[in-house]
Amino acid sequence: MSSPLGPEPSTADRRATAWTMFSVITPIGDSGHCGAYDLHGQSGYGRIGMRFRPLTTGLMAFAVALWFGCQGLSKNGTYLVPTPTAAAAKEILYIVDKGEVTTYTIDTEDLAPLMAGGPVNLIPTSSALLQLLPSPNDHVLYVLWSDDTQQEHLATYATDLSGVPQLPAVQILNVASLSQLNIHPSGGFIYAMQRNSSSEMYTTTIQLFRVLPSGMLQPSPQVQGEYGPSVMPTLLYGLSPDGTELYLQSEEANGPVYWERKVNGDDGTLAADVLLFRPPGKDSVVFGTTLIIDYQNEMDCPQPRYVDVLPNEPQPPGPLIQCRSNMLGACGAASNVQLDPSGTYLFLTDTEAQQVRVVKIDLSRHAVTDTGSFLPLSAQTPGFSFSPDGTLVYALLASDRSVHIFGFDRTSGRLGEGPTPIPRSASAGFLPARRR
């Protein structure tokens, strides 16, 4: 699902409470406290961004923005194949308030939003929405929710030409203790973590769902991996943009450790775990298409902090860029770092300057340079998200707590604000998508 949420919990809080993710969705690489995680998400496509908050039902879920190639559905579930044209593509923004979804289309020329439909209530009253995932073409929405008996359900909804979800659901599956749904870029598979806990120890398994031509899901009887028991559950961190790798994160005494598993593109099965990256201490991490961003978050890391840029390869030998305050002041003060979908720019949240600064990665000079462009300080951290193609930035600003729309020039790094923000209630989140 979406929308920035607030300060991240301490490690002790996370052990005591299950968490659900409603925060900003971007391609791999997003938030994470000093020693937590981060994809995504948000860098090439097929990635996720994560933030957590307590969920009273005691369930855990992640919001994942991974796009797959599903087509539209008719009312009887048959496969409808629209004629693909570039002109038909629409930028979509969902405002999600509990179980209600309001759909906006965004004019990419003047950045003006237009309400296309809603609110549409996708779950029964007194139920809890855990996760919302659009397909890559936004022809299908997958909704994970829990009813008042704490039974979980995974529903499939078709959308109309403007991305508005259509009632009733095409399919509803009964599931148990699922979270962290990730959609393979091919559209052929969905992965999820199933969690079991006893005596404050966690065991997690990777579950595989195959996507049928109708967009409906077929659970695989074969478990793709089992982890634990451990004090902290293993997290399904995301998928690489080309879908060849699945990322996992485990928590050790000295901080997080990241693993990768190769994906069989024919049937979705996974190869053995390979150590990808062990950050120093309790750093936060963002995975890009070719880069890994390792940084210190303000929660557990006092200033001066740092931002390192490394190659995205198993156990990278060392940083390509080491940004400290003497290179760029924002690197020493950044409380959160995101990587844009092109992998060229870092968005550094600088609370002292009350700005989210846009800086360019220059590998040839082993440096990052300030573009002079910035977002006003957001109401939450990180509080903003990229459109799937990276040309728009949606930001929940502290000034009015509405969602503001910015155009992003990936050549210059410049931002331009649209004329009309989208109002939202205090409980609502937001989720970008792209209708094609």
Image (cartoon, rainbow, N blue to C red):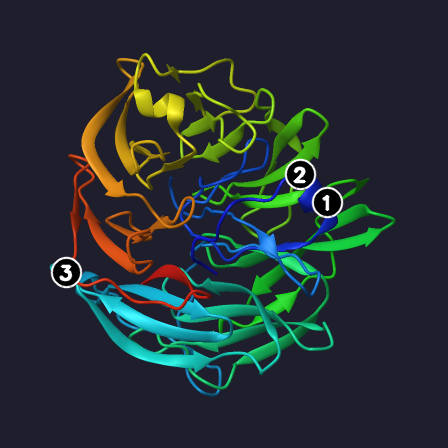
What SS does tag 2 mark?
helix
Dot 2 surroundings within 10 Å: few (below 14), some, or many (20 or more)? Answer: few
In the rendered view, does 379 fall on the left or right side of 176? left
Quadrant where the C terminus sits is bottom left
Instruction: Tell me what residue is drawn at x 36 percent, y 63 percent.
Output: 137
Question: Is residue 33 positioned above or below 185 on the image?
Answer: above
Front-most of 123 and 311?
123
| Residue identifier under label 1 | 15
User: Looking at the image, can residue 81 be seen?
Assistant: no
Residue 409's spot in the image, x, y percent?
A: 17, 42
Evaluate if marks 1 and 2 touch, with contact meaning CB atoms under 8 Å apart.
yes
Amino acid identity at mark 3:
Pro
3D distance between C-alphas at marks 2 and 3: 41 Å
Label for residue 74?
A: none
Q: Looking at this rendering, what residue extends furthest in the left direction? A: 110
Instruction: Tell me what residue is drawn at x 55 percent, y 57 percent.
Output: 189
Evaluate if marks 1 and 3 touch, with contact meaning CB atoms under 8 Å apart.
no
Question: Is residue 338 positioned above or below 423 on the image?
Answer: above
Label for residue 11?
A: 2
| Residue identifier under label 3 | 419
Mark nearer the N terminus (1 vs 3): 1
The quarter of the picture where residue 232 lies is top right
Residue 236's spot in the image, x, y percent?
A: 61, 46
Residue 21's spot in the image, x, y percent?
A: 55, 55
3D distance between C-alphas at marks 1 and 2: 6 Å
Amino acid identity at mark 2:
Thr
Evaluate if marks 2 and 3 touch, with contact meaning CB atoms under 8 Å apart.
no
Dot 3 surroundings within 10 Å: few (below 14), some, or many (20 or more)? Answer: few
Instruction: Tell me what residue is drawn at x 68 percent, y 54 percent.
Output: 18
